[in-house]
Image (cartoon, helix red, strand yellow):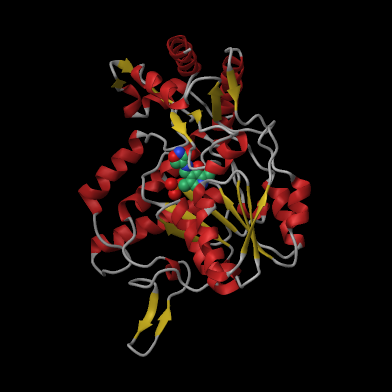
């Protein structure tokens, strides 16, 4: 067991010290984005102070340094998710960018009229809309795995949905609006029995639990840097080499080519085939500091801390009259979504904000979930490694205060 020292962790995040509306900040919107530790902030300043230069282009000293640093991040990402090869890590702008890349490129190569794409009822819009766009373009059909009232996917229906027509399955590991952890290993195994590859959206998993793409045998895995204590504007597409090689490039431009003439262009090898143009160099390089930071603390320690906090917060929340938790699966991670009878989620969010408590309200870019539960949205508190029982106590007290004003 490494040392999980919550006071030390909190001290590493400068923004947590600030006040909001005259109150000490209680930041519970980590599902949207996490705060950054000082090592990441320092890395960003250090990048611009010492090494700013374009990658993969120059022979000069600084360009070599920034290229090397960018590739260090790729190796750290490979190790972080236990991928086999560096070049199976494509550095993108984020989860949304990664999913669009797969939808477009896998779609071009493998999707035809009448084919089926399977997603689930609890996807973020970014794992729905790119597939809908592809279906519209190709005349393919979107099939949706339903979920029950607890927010658990129906595995029997999933098994029935898989057929010779299915060409890809795209599911989230952890729901951003419900917190449900899906049994993706089993779901991947089932898809593979039908010869179908699986994309897993790990945007809400990567910062909370250990992932091993080889153990999962997942075909594509996507996530964002900014939700894992790293910079915004960088993310990852992990893809098995065989799929990435079989897919055409996403965008054309610099770096993704081997040779260009007006008659014909040949494409670069992996991973550069999918990395056209100047990437977000600063974010790419500084994501390494976030990975180091997480590794130093340990994902098992982070998970244990967050799970205990989730259990504590769930109990406190359930004790408040009129509160209905949305998403009550047995397997959950770090998300508490709820509604209160007779009160609009937005009004609760505004009053909590006056108390310095940051939560998100609304549909959380998962409108179909809200439709299923017949609610306009929820109030969502989402946890990170730096949250404390004291944060939860302040949040619960704030909620009680808000409800006395609203009810
Ligand atoms: N998939 C899931 C499961 C997500 O939670 C999000 C962002 C995305 C994809 C998209 O990630 P991006 O980095 O490309 O934007 N989720 C949220 C959220 O829950 N609140 O704000 C953003």
Q: Is residue 311 left or right of residue 191?
A: left
Query: Where residue 79 appears, x then y in whole percent?
Result: 53, 51
Q: Is residue 73 left or right of residue 199?
A: left
Image height of 168 relative to 182, above or below: below
The residue under the point 38% across, 18% down is 351
Query: Where residue 32 appears, x then y in whole percent?
Result: 44, 37
Query: In the current view of this chain or complex, which residue is farthest to the left?
Result: 49
Q: Is residue 289 left or right of residue 295?
A: left
Query: Where residue 46 appears, x then y in whole percent?
Result: 26, 45
Q: Nearer the viewer, residue 400 or 277?
A: 400
Q: Number of labelled discs?
A: 0
Q: Nearer the viewer, residue 299 or 183?
A: 183
Q: Nearer the viewer, residue 192 or 328?
A: 328
Image height of 371 relative to 21, above or below: below
Q: Nearer the viewer, residue 6 or 265?
A: 265
**Image quarter (top left, top right, bottom left or bottom right) of the N terminus:** top right
Query: Where residue 329 appears, x then y in whole percent?
Result: 67, 32
> Can residue 361 be spotted in the picture?
yes
Q: Quadrant of residue 40?
A: top left
Query: In the current view of this chain or complex, which residue is farthest to the bottom?
Result: 263
Image height of 37 relative to 50, above or below: above
Q: Is residue 315 left or right of residue 351?
A: right
The residue under the point 50% across, 66% down is 104
> Can residue 292 be spotted in the picture?
no
């Amino acid at each position: 067991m490494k040392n999980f020292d919550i006071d030390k962790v909190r001290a590493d995040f400068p923004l947590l010290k600030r006040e909001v509306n005259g109150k000490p900040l209680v930041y519970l919107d980590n599902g949207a984005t996490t705060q950054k530790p000082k090592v990441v902030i320092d890395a960003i300043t250090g990048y611009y102070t010492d090494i700013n230069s374009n990658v993969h282009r120059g022979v000069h000293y600084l360009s070599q340094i920034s290229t090397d640093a960018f590739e260090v991040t790729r190796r750290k990402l490979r190790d972080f998710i236990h991928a086999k090869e560096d070049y199976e890590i494509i550095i993108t702008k984020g989860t949304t960018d990664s999913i669009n890349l797969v939808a477009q490129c896998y779609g071009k190569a493998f999707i035809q009229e009448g084919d089926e794409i399977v997603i689930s009822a609890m996807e973020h819009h970014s794992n729905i809309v790119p597939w809908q766009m592809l279906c519209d373009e190709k005349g393919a059909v979107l099939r949706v795995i339903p979920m029950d009232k607890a927010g658990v996917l129906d595995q029997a229906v999933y098994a029935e949905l898989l057929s010779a027509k299915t060409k890809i399955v795209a599911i989230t590991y952890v729901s951003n609006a419900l917190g449900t952890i899906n049994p993706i290993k089993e779901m991947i195994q089932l898809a593979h029995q039908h010869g179908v590859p699986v994309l897993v959206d790990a945007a809400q998993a990567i910062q909370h639990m250990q992932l091993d793409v080889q153990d999962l045998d997942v075909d594509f895995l996507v996530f964002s840097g900014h939700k894992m204590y790293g910079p915004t504007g960088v993310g990852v597409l992990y893809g098995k080499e065989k799929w990435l090689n079989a897919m055409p490039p996403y965008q054309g431009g610099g770096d993704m080519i081997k040779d260009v003439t007006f008659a014909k262009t040949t494409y670069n090898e992996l991973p550069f085939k999918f990395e056209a143009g100047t990437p977000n160099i600063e974010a790419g390089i500084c994501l390494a500091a976030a990975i180091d930071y997480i590794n130093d603390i340990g994902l098992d320690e982070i998970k244990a801390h967050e799970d205990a906090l989730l259990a504590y917060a769930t109990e406190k929340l359930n004790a408040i009259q009129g509160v209905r938790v949305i998403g009550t699966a047995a397997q959950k991670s770090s998300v508490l979504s709820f509604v209160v009878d007779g009160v609009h989620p937005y009004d609760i969010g505004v009053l909590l904000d006056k108390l310095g408590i940051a939560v998100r309200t609304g549909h959380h870019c998962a409108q179909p979930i809200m439709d299923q539960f017949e609610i306009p949205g929820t109030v969502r508190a989402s946890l990170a490694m730096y949250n404390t029982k004291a944060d939860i106590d302040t949040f619960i007290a704030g909620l009680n205060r808000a409800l006395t004003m609203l009810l």
